[in-house]
Amino acid sequence: MTVQSDLQKAIASCEAAKGSYSLMAQSTEDQETKQMFEQMSSEVDRHINFLNNRLSYLNENNPLNS
């Protein structure tokens, strides 16, 4: 297993978590809970962005990809 495939799996997991948080935010009527799930989803966006940037860097700078 390569680092790139590990990153792709981590990104997929984060996307799934983000979807779950968004669904939970939509499913609740409690505004405080809704806000918490929306904040959690936003935090996962930062994680996904970092992971995507790292994956891009590795793809561009890995001599095996040339």
Image: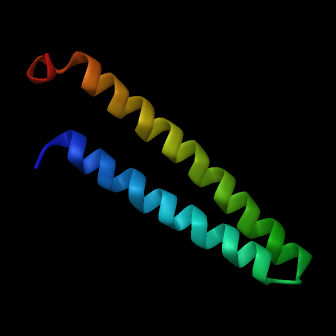
- The relative height of residue 2 versus residue 16 in the rendered view (above or below) is above
Instruction: Classify residue 50 as left or right of residue 31.
Output: left
Instruction: Classify residue 9 as left or right of residue 51.
Output: left
Q: Within the image, what quadrant is residue 29 found in?
A: bottom right
Specify the color scheme: rainbow
- The relative height of residue 13 versus residue 65 in the rendered view (above or below) is below
Q: Position of residue 66 (x, y in %)?
A: 13, 15
State the residue at coordinates (65%, 59%).
41
Q: Position of residue 63 (x, y in %)?
A: 11, 17
Q: Nearer the viewer, residue 66 or 31?
A: 66
State the residue at coordinates (51%, 46%).
47
State the residue at coordinates (30%, 46%).
7
Q: How many marks?
A: 0
Instruction: Classify residue 3 as left or right of residue 35.
Output: left
Instruction: Classify residue 19 as left or right of residue 24.
Output: left
Q: Position of residue 53 (x, y in %)?
A: 43, 30
Q: Position of residue 15 (x, y in %)?
A: 50, 58
- The relative height of residue 18 versus residue 29 in the rendered view (above or below) is above
